[in-house]
Amino acid sequence: MKKIIIISLAVVAMVACKVDDVYYGTYAEDYIPPYDIDWYAAADSSTNMVLIDHFFMWPEDALWVDNRWAYGYFNPDSDKMNTANNAYWGQAHAIDVVTDAYNRTGDTYYSDIMAMWFQQVPQWQYGKGEVDPVGYANNGWYNPFVDDMEWIVLAQLRMYEATGINDYFETAKYIYDSWIITAWDYDENGGGILWARNQDRSKNACSNGPAAIIAARLYNYTGDEKYLDDAKMIYDWLKAVLYVPSTGAVNDNISGGTSISTYNSAYNQGTFLGAAHELYKITGRSSYLSEAVKAGEFATEDSGQLDATGKLLKGEDPGDLGLFKGILVRYLTLLANEPDVDKSTRKKFHDFLVYNASILWTEGVIKDDPDGYGMLYTGTLDEPGYFSGDFTVNTAGATIIEAMSILQPVN
C-alpha cells in the first residue's frame, strides 16, 4: 500500500520556527532563505508526495498493455492513466531517487519499490520490438540508445550497493558486458562508445562518461582489472576527443572523424567529472581529480547552463533535458564531499549546490498543491511556464533535494 507522509509539503513550507539542520552546513553566503529548511523533511515530502505519489504505478493503478497489466514503473503521465509510455532512461533517475531515500532512511518501503520496479519494468515494454544486434539474450532491458542502458545499469548498481541484493548486480553486469562495452569500436572517430546502435556513427560524451563510471564501479565490486582497464580506456578517449582542458568544457559528440559538436550540457559536465572522480578514488592519480574539479568549475561558473545571474542552473525544456540538472547535482555533490579537493573549491561547490536547492525549495515548489517543481527560471513565481508537472523535471528536482541530505558542511 502507499506510504502515508505525516509531514506535508505545506507544513514544511509554512513552519515559522527555526529548525537546526545538520545535513548541509551553512547556507550559501549570498542567499538567506525566508526560513530554515529541514532538508530531511523536504526530501521525505518531495520524494514521496511529488515523485512517487504522482508518477509511480502501483498495482491498483495498472494499465492494460500488451495483454497484461502494467505496473511497478514510473509513468510520465502524472494522471497515471492516459499513457503507457515507459520513459526508459527516466526510469533510472526516478529509481535513483528512491534509492537515495532508502539510503537516507533505511525504510523498507523504498526497497520494496525497488524490488517491484526491478521485477515489473522489463516484463511489459522494454526491449520489445528491438533486435539485439550482438547475439545476447534480450532480458527485457535492451535499448538501442546505449546511454539509456547505462543509466539503468548505474541505477541497478546503486540498488545493489544499498540493499546487497545480488540480482541487481548480476543484471547490471550482464547489460554492461553484453550491450555497453560491445558498443566500443575503433573507427574514424578513434574509438569511443556509440551513442546509439540504430543511429549514425556518432560517439557522444553522454554515452562515454556514464560508461566510464560503470566500469570503475564494476572494478570496485569485482576487483577484475578488465573493468578498470575499460574505465581508463573510455575516460582517456573522452578526455582526448571531447574535453577542453583550457576551460573544463565537455563537448557533446564527434562524428565522421572530424565534426565535433561544441554543445555543452549539465549532463556531460556531470558525468565527465563523475568519471574522473571515480578513477581518482581508485588510482589516487592527481590529474583525474584536477580534471574533475576543472569540469565542475566550468559547470558552476562559466557554462551556458546558468541563468543571467551566473548562480542558478537555468530552466530546461520538459522531456529529456529536464533530467540534466539532476545529473550534474548528483555527481557534483560527491565531488564537493571529496576531502582531497581543496577547501576553497569544496566551499564554492557546496555553496552553489545549497543556493540552487534553497531557491528550488523556497521558490520552485508548489507546496499546497504539489504538481511539480519549478523549471528554475529567473523571475517571479507567476511567470508563465515557471512550474512544470513534467516527469523529468520533477525527478531532477527530487534528486536535488535528496542531495542535500548527503552534502557535507565545509568548516
Image (cartoon, rainbow, N blue to C red):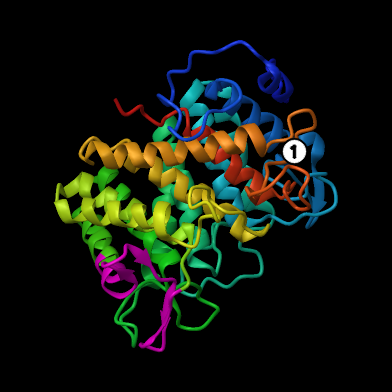
In the picture shown, does residue 251 fall above or below 297?
below
Nearest to the observer: residue 45 or residue 219: 45
Q: Quadrant of the N terminus?
A: top right
Residue furthest out toward the right: 82
380 horizontally vs 283: left or right: right
Residue 365, horizontal then vertical, whole percent: 69, 36
Q: Amino acid at mark 1?
A: His
Nearest to the observer: residue 3 or residue 71: 3
Q: For residue 210, what is the image quadrant? A: bottom left
226 horizontally vs 121: left or right: left
In this orientation, does residue 159 appear? no
In the picture shown, does residue 396 fall above or below 43?
below
Nearest to the observer: residue 350 or residue 54: 350
Magenta highlight range: 236-262
In this orientation, does residue 379 appear? yes
Q: Quadrant of the C terminus?
A: top left
- SS category of the residue bearing label 1: helix
Report which residue position mark 1 lands on: 54
Going 47% across and 31% down the picture, which residue do you hit? 404
- Magenta-span inclusion, residue 400: no
Q: For residue 166, what is the image quadrant? A: top left
Going 23% across and 35% down the picture, which residue do you hit? 339
